[in-house]
Image (cartoon, rainbow, N blue to C red):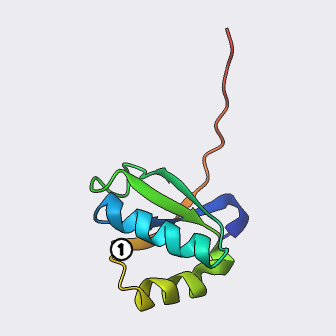
């Protein structure tokens, strides 16, 4: 598996938990992007965080220490979007 062609998503039961984790990651100077939750993996909360694979051990520790509720952490193949102009 070529990990460079995958994005790592942290999924949440609600947006409040997602924003809590984003705040804690910002404090720890860990990069995370808020993104729409891909519908193929969850129909719950509409936001997720995209994180770097190398940061996962620290992210999991932050989740545990701060009792942040998540649904799961998954990897999805990165989609190569191509836009056409008319």
User: Quadrant where the C terminus lies?
Assistant: top right
Q: Residue at x 33, y 63 (%)?
A: 16
Judge left or right: residue 46 versus residue 62: left
* Image coords of residue 39 (percent x, y): 37, 48
Q: Secondary structure at mark 1?
A: loop
Question: On screen, 22 above or below 36?
Answer: below
| The one of 44 and 32 positioned closer to us in this rendering | 32
Residue 52 location, x and y as percent?
65, 70
Residue 85, quarter of picture: top right
Q: Residue at x 43, y 91 (%)?
A: 65
User: In this rendering, does residue 11 appear at all?
Assistant: no
Say above or below: 68 vs 2.
Answer: below
At x 68% / y 69%, what residue is drawn?
Answer: 3
Q: Which residue occupies the foreground of this view, 8 or 63?
A: 63
Please state, as top left, top right, bottom left or bottom right, where the N terminus lies in the image.
bottom right
Up/down of 75 relative to 39, above or below: below
> Where, by quadrant of the figure, is residue 2 drawn?
bottom right
Determine whether 47 is above or below 18 in the image: above
Foreground of the two, 60 or 83: 60
Q: Position of residue 69 (x, y in %)?
A: 32, 77
Crowdedness of circle 1 by 10 Å Cα count: few (<14), some, many (20+)?
some
Residue 60, visible in the rendered structure: yes
* Total residue callouts: 1
User: What residue do we see at 67% from left, 19% from top?
Assistant: 84
The residue singled out by tag 1 in the image is: 70
């Amino acid at each position: 598996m070529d990990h460079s062609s995958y994005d790592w998503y942290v999924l949440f039961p609600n947006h409040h938990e997602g924003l809590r984790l984003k705040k804690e990651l910002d404090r720890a100077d860990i990069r995370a992007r808020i993104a729409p939750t891909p519908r193929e993996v969850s129909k719950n909360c509409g936001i997720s965080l995209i994180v770097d694979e190398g940061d996962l051990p620290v992210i999991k520790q932050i989740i545990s220490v701060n009792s942040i509720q998540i649904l799961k952490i998954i990897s999805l193949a990165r989609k190569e979007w191509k836009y056409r102009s008319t």
